[in-house]
Amino acid sequence: MTKLGQWLCGLALLGSAWAVLALAPPALQPPSPLRQALLPLPLYLLVAFGCYSLATVGYRLATFNDCEEAAAELQEHIRAARADLRRRGLRL
Amino acid sequence: RLSVLLPTYNERDNLPLVVWLLVRTFRDSGIDFEIIIIDDGSPDGTQEVAEQLEKIYGSDKILLRPRARKLGLGTAYIHGMKHATGNFIVIMDADLSHHPKFIPEFIRKQKEGNFDIVSGTRYKGNGGVYGWDLKRKLISRGANFLTQVLLRPGASDLTGSFRLYRKEVLQKLMEKCVSKGYVFQMEMIVRARQLGYTIGEVPISFVDRVYGESKLGGNEIVSFLKGLLTLFATT
């Protein structure tokens, strides 16, 4: 199954479970406090996911390593390489 | 034995430096190697420099397999692989953003877990980037996050192009992959997972010396998103 397919299945499953419980006819309704929590649940989950995304990307952005030493080392290596290549006869 | 595939386009200045670093790394660690340079008709004389390098290091170590015009990365890999005699293939950029010193670490990792693919990652461990401003880093992390959520690929860096492959694995993947650019590298990992190949990761440092000249444009972001959604819907 494709990733899209998995998402659609998952959403269909959760969506129908939510619909059954939250939008049921009066006879089959779950107790009132549960219903009150259930009704806005999809929106809450969306907002929660949004916050999680922002926090995660923000954290990863802040901890993105800056390779200063790697850049400096590369400069050294470039110098050594140029010198050695010139010795070996490379004409740039 | 290791075959390094080096597709080049206008890398007249960087090519000799990359080759020098590769040769030194391999000689220092006793790794049997060959370097295959696939130049796409660079107008700046890259091919001439490649020929000089072939004279200096020998045509058994430096293989020149040029092409007439710019034909794209995917076909460059296919073309290069036809002439590769190694059982492992390393793909990397020829502009010095990837340092050959990581290749022995790739090999070590490969042996450690008998992996089919070892991917260099900028996002884990002490991997990282030099030369990117905040905006570029944000785009990178944001795109990677989106990719992780949608594709759950089991690898932390999908758009990276510094990797070690078993030769048969790369050949199989090249048959199946159809995208271009960043998405091409992503597709390789995704398809590899589909085919049950194992992927190991090694943190690498990516030193971007061209970022100032080549900004990440809106066009590239759009084509990345299109490619990502295509992979999402088809794999």
Image (cartoon, coloured by chain):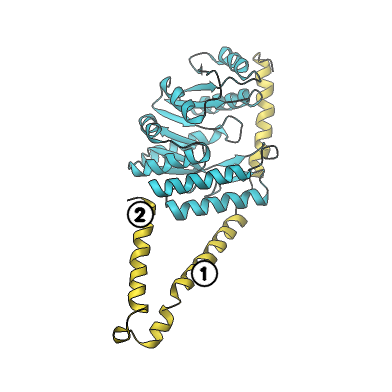
Q: Amino acid under label 2? A: Gly
Q: Quick one: label 1, few (<14), some, or many (20+) residues within 10 Å?
A: few
Q: Is residue A29 above or below residue A18?
A: below
Q: Is residue A70 left or right of B186 when viewed as pictured?
A: right
Q: Is residue B49 left or right of residue B89?
A: right
Marks 1 and 2 in Cβ contact (< 8 Å) = no
Rendered location of residue B85, percent (x, y): 40, 21
Nearest the eye: B71 or B105: B71
Q: Secondary structure at mark 2?
A: helix
Quarter that holds the N terminus of chain B: top left
Q: Say which residue label 2 marks.
A: A5
In the image, residue A13 lies at what x, y percent?
33, 66
Q: Quadrant of residue B49?
A: top right
Q: Which amino acid is tagged 1? A: Val
Residue beneath disc 1: A47
- Residue B123 horizontal/vertical position (percent): 54, 49
The chain displayed yellow equals A
In this view, the mark in front (1 or 2): 2
Q: Residue at x 47, y 27 (%)?
A: B75
Q: Position of residue B112 (x, y in %)?
A: 39, 41
